[in-house]
Structures are given as C-alpha cells and as structure tokens.
C-alpha cells in the first residue's frame, strides 16, 4: 500500500478545501495513460483505501491502484511554483527510489519522471 506523509496529507487537505465546500467529497488518485497519476474531486466508494488528515477524509485510492503502488510514498516538496506532491519508491516500472513529479508515477516504457 502507498504511504502518505503527514505533509502530503496536509497539502491534500488544502487542495480539497480550495476546490470543494462539500464535506462528503474528497480527492481521488486516478491512473491515466502511460502511468500518469491525477487527482479528481469525488466521493468515497466501497473498497476504497481512504486517507484522513485531522479527522477529514482527504484522499481515496481504488483498491487495485493502491495495490500497484506498494512501496511508493507520497510527500510534498516546496518549489518556486509552490507546494508539489511527489512520489518516491517502486511502482512497478523498474525505477526504484527515483523521484516522480506531480501527477506521474511512471512514464511509458519504464522511464521515470
């Protein structure tokens, strides 16, 4: 299962609060083409892996995606453009311990972003 740092959970909570006023909504990590990852606003569904921060549900990951991200950790990094969510670890693309940029775990053909 993916590990999410407290700093990343706080950033997810900030993103959610800026984009939704509905307390039943949370962010969902989704997989896109060629291993890219994205966040959408959604509602929790049965079977989701749910992550909370300060008692508020901030992130849902569908069970199959969470299983593929075993050994991956999500953190937040301060950049010139502001906070950026990052991923570290092995997400099955052969890129152990390489840092991934926002919204991307592994690119096509085993390359890391």
Image (cartoon, helix red, strand yellow):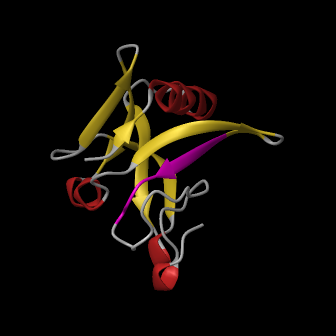
Residue 68's x, y, as percent?
Answer: 27, 62
Compared with residue 78, is residue 28 higher up or lower down, i.e. above or below? below
The reply to whether the magenta stretch includes residue 90 is: yes
Magenta part of the chain: 84-91
Q: Is residue 49 left or right of residue 41?
A: left
Q: How many badges with numbers are in the image?
A: 0
Viewer-closest of 47 and 81: 81
Q: Is residue 11 left or right of residue 28?
A: right
Quadrant location of residue 57? top left
The reply to whether the magenta stretch includes residue 44 is: no
Q: Quadrant of the C terminus?
A: bottom right
Residue 109's x, y, as percent?
Answer: 48, 86
Q: Residue furthest right?
A: 80
Compared with residue 73, is residue 11 higher up or lower down, i.e. above or below? above
Q: Is residue 41 left or right of residue 69?
A: right
- The residue located at (59%, 26%) in the rendering is 14
Q: Residue furthest top?
A: 54
Q: Residue furthest bottom?
A: 109
- The residue located at (48%, 62%) in the rendering is 105
Secondary structure of the magenta portion, mostly?
strand
Residue 43's x, y, as percent?
Answer: 34, 41
Q: Residue furthest left?
A: 47
Residue 71's x, y, as percent?
Answer: 31, 51
Viewer-closest of 22 and 49: 49
Compared with residue 94, is residue 74 higher up or lower down, i.e. above or below? above
């Amino acid at each position: 299962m993916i590990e999410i740092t407290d700093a990343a959970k706080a950033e997810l909570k900030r993103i959610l609060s800026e984009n939704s006023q509905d307390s039943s909504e949370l962010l969902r990590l989704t997989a896109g083409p060629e291993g890219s990852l994205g966040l959408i606003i959604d509602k929790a569904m049965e079977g989701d892996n749910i992550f909370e921060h300060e008692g508020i549900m901030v992130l849902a990951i569908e069970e199959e995606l969470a299983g593929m991200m075993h050994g991956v950790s999500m953190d937040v990094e301060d950049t010139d453009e502001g906070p950026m969510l990052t991923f570290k670890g092995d997400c099955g693309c052969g890129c152990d311990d390489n840092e991934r940029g926002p919204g991307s775990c592994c690119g096509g053909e085993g390359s890391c972003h």
